[in-house]
Amino acid sequence: MSQRKQGESLHANKKNLQNSKITIEVHSSELKQEELRQKELNYLRGVIALWSKQLNEKVNVKKNVQLSAIEYKNSFADNENEIPIDDVADMGELHIHAVKMHYQFGAAPKPTENVCECVQNNDGKVVLLGEPGSGKSVALLKIAIEYAKRALNDPNSLIPLLVPLGTYKGDRTVEDFLEAFLGALGKDYLKRNCAKRIIKIFDALNETDNQKYQDVIAYIKKQNRFIVSCRILDYEESFSGINNLATIEILPLDPIRIKEAVNTDLWKKLGGNEYVISAWKKITDKLKN
């Protein structure tokens, strides 16, 4: 065989080896993706079952109704504004401190009839505020379950990680603490590139250990997206300075929602009747117009 043919043969063999190597690498990558997706599916099925059970066990009538809320959004206006009391007085029971906190950024309060939809529509950075027993934990469970169901059917959807901050004792880093809730995903999931698909949902910031509060705040601020709940009186503008931060404040139940939340006998004992509902509708219709 001539040197030229030998060279061509060696070149062809080398090319075949390279192609074989690429094929093996692609196949290996596909297997890893399949393995990772299976872990995600196992995790999602597990948390849907767990969170659904926790939701059912909640002794809170508010789990049966759509909660209303007021949304504020940081838009960082150039000039701070005085609070136009006439503009907010007709919007129901607002907490003045919350109006002050956000109106300075030029963001007018926006009412919403469904707090869960409002939080999910903001798919970025959200603070959920409410009084004790207002339904914050119930809302977060519903939101987390909805995210999980979506991700179960769509491999590109966000994967929820629901974390009760009241159980963090500061004996490890915040990220190590979060890893305990990853279940089937495995402890190294947060360190992978695909972890960008995680949406971290932190329940009860106000229950965080005082000595570790600032560590938790600093960690949350670094996240690309998060949802965190807190009692109104314990919230101290911890996330001020974050652009496009949505702060959503759960409102007390109105008569219509109270009727939906309780059984008929209890509704009557509370003095509820069709006159109350009719009067409330007239008031709200007048405010809307």
Image (cartoon, helix red, strand yellow):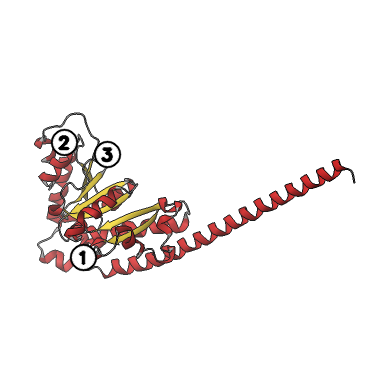
Q: Earlier in the sequence, mark 2 or mark 1?
A: 1
The residue mark sitting in front, 3 or 1, is 3
Q: Earlier in the sequence, mark 3 or mark 1?
A: 1
Instruction: Please give the label number shown on residue 104.
Output: 2
Q: Earlier in the sequence, mark 3 or mark 2?
A: 2
Whether the residues at callouts 3 and 2 have beta carbons within 8 Å, the answer is no
| Above or below: residue 96 compared with residue 46 | above
Query: Which element carries disc 1, helix, strand or loop?
Result: loop
Task: Give the spatial CA distance, label 3 vs label 2.
Answer: 13 Å
Between 91 and 190, the one lying in front of the other is 190
- The residue under the point 17% across, 48% down is 281
Q: Relative to residue 258, is residue 246 drawn left or right?
A: right
Between 145 and 43, the one lying in front of the other is 43
Amino acid on which disc 3 is placed: Asn
Q: Which residue is mark 1?
A: 60
Instruction: Please give the label number shown on residue 243.
Output: 3
- The residue under the point 22% across, 57% down is 136
| Above or below: residue 42 compared with residue 83 | below
Q: Relative to residue 74, is residue 200 drawn left or right?
A: right
Instruction: Please give the label number shown on residue 127.
Output: none
Q: Position of residue 119 (x, y in %)?
A: 29, 49
For residue 132, what is the image quadrant? bottom left
Query: Which element carries disc 2, helix, strand or loop?
Result: loop
| Above or below: residue 263 compared with residue 144 | below
Crowd band around label 2 with a 10 angstrom C-alpha radius: few (<14), some (14–19), many (20+): some
- The residue under the point 33% across, 55% down is 200
Task: Give the spatial CA distance, label 3 vs label 1.
Answer: 34 Å
